[in-house]
Amino acid sequence: MKESVRHTALREFEAPTVHQLTLKVNPVSADSLVSDILDQFQSHADLPLLPVIGEGQVYLGSISRRHFLSFMTQAFARELFLRKSVTELLKQKSELAAIPMVVIAEERVDHTLRELLSRDPDMKYEALPVLEGDRFIGVVAVTDMMASLSESQEKLIEVMHSLSVRLNEEVAQAALLQRNLLPPSEIRQPGLRGSATLITSTEVGGDFFDYYCVSDTRMVLLIGDVSGHGVASGVLVSAAKAAVNLLSADGEHDPSTILTRLNHAILKVAHQRLLMTLFAACLDTQTGDLTYANAGHQFPYLYRYALGEMVMLETGGLPLGKSQDTDFSSMSTQMDVGDKLFLYTDGILEEENGEQEPFGYDRLEALLSRYFDEEPAYLGERLLEALREFSGKKQFADDVTVFCVEHHERRIADPREQIANSADNDLEVVRIAESFYRANQDRLIPRLSRQNLVFLAEQHFADLIPRFALDGIRRVLPRHNPTILRLGWKKLLAQHQNLRCCDLDAYLPKPQTAREFQLAHSADKEFVIEEVEAWLMESGCIESDRLAAVAMILDELIENGLYAAPRDGRGRALYVKGSERDLGKGEMLCLKVAFQDGLLGLHLQDSWGTLTPAVFLNRLMRHAEGRGLVAGVGGAGLYLIWRLGDYLQFRVHPHHQTQATVLLDLQAPENPDKDKGFQFIYHSEIHENLENEQFHAANYASAAD
């Protein structure tokens, strides 16, 4: 019920209080004669009770009319007590002042009558004294209270009838609003088609489904169920829909992030009084990649058309609204053309027949096996029809939702399409497609800022690295690389912005586990590498066969920080490679290692900021051309780091700081021969004019890395 309706009801009906029915009666003194009491009762036929007060107006008790007159009709009573004081009478006949209870003026009449009936079930007393604090203010007749209560009940019935009409109207409006919040039941998107049906057991339900497109190739699918059903559940469903609208506007497609943000929204609204299960999935119709996460919802079914088999996507998690710190993990699988995904709520499983037998998983799976080859809409119709036949009822006991989609065609991306169109317009990123770059052999415009230039690779691009070195292209992102897709185009394209935070923290903001090491001496390198290896094995986040690559990357990163980074003003190395040395005063070399959702991050930060884009590109170029190591200098380190990781990023603030970040995708197979994405972000006030000889890669051939 809305607040305005409830407040209106309170104004229209208020239970009467004793104060409203109190009759003013002058009390008698304890020193008064009994004959005076008799005169008052005989002269005032409507006087039900006389209170007795003592010194200081202290209330001593009350004399009931009925009991006093009954006693005084006895002959001996008049002779013995008529000329005595009330005090003397009550000393010998205290029962004449006995009453079942004293009433507080502000007490509700219905509460007072309930208490009176428990104390005086035979209704022997016709009135009660009324106090306001410690002060006597009058008496209230039992008959007056009963008449008032009867009148108030009649008014309450009228008010409740009015409220019922209004409540029914508002529930109907809420039901209409909830239906309008749902997306169309028929789903027709490029690469995906399907059908969804939601049936509520009451006017307003607690089931929920939704879907939205993030791009031309990504579709997010959601299904949920609020604990219970009715208006309260419906309110929470509306809150979830509002939060989903924000996710859609933000272009969010990662299921774990979706659940995390919805969990925060549900907690703020329900305060743990109501919970919501939710399954979130995202299908890339260009690649067939299906990523999903679960917050306590029923496991969906995936039908693999080519194999003719049905599998359950078993991944769990706490319901939304249970805990602020819940971590939702994403899983992934592949959907081929013709495969179907079936989502549902527990109303199907729990619907009972006349013998109180639930529909259950066995019947559901039998029906799915029978109809999975049919169109999604037909499958849903047959399932609901079978459920009605089983229950023998037209109306289900709980809300029921069926949601089935089919990946009916593989979406082909337009080669002219720019990737990451969800990125902010103010990024001012210039994107170069590989097809354009290969078709045009001319040098790039010298004054074009390389910081804002991103090369979009299709597949292998190592043969283009010599041209990258000449053109100064230092941001290369493979379009179809799964690690790049997991990190997100918007975040990757925004890396040229002058971010002061740790890059590893930006990419892995909520790690499941993390360590940090501060190096003080060159001898610390071996200890740190061994410590990281032991820690990773103990944590169980990495297979033993990937540890060798991690150790090699760590070795090269720390070597660069110890010997290649420290340079004098003319760019000459300050220390001989492999020599023992202490870190100087003010020098910092910090290693961070973090693991989050299948991504292992290695991050080294030094306080020199001497690595340049040209040195980096030169190292990659020499190996791409087969020239490899530089005599007497080395130079394989940067190339090995790029090959062994799945994404490499350098961020340099010249003469201040260098951040080297390597990400390994432990969910993807190790492939050192695959060309990986890299970005070299160089924050310099000097415009990089490539015609200036100081930026020519050849001039750095003798520089050590």
Image: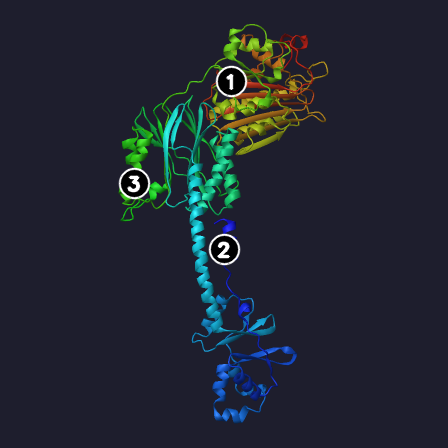
Residue 439 in the image: state x and y as whole percent.
51, 7
Q: Earlier in the sequence, mark 2 or mark 1?
A: 2
Depth check, mark 2 against mark 3: the one in front is: 2
- Determine the residue located farthest toward the top in the rendered image: 441
Q: Are marks 2 and 1 in contact (CB under 8 Å)?
A: no
Describe the element under mark 3 as helix, strand or loop.
Answer: helix
CA gap, disc 3 to disc 1?
48 Å
Q: Is residue 342 visible?
A: no
Q: How many labels does the image show?
A: 3
Q: Do the residues labelled 2 and 3 touch (CB within 8 Å)?
A: no
Residue receiving disc 3: 387
Q: Which amino acid does label 3 sit on?
A: Leu
- Position of the C terminus, as image quadrant, is top right
Residue receiving disc 2: 9
Q: Which amino acid does label 2 sit on?
A: Ala
In the rendered view, does 398 fall on the left or right side of 174?
Answer: left
Describe the element under mark 2 as helix, strand or loop.
Answer: helix
Residue receiving disc 1: 418
Residue located at (60% from left, 86% from top):
32
Badge 1, how many Cα within 10 Å: few under 14, some, many 20+? few
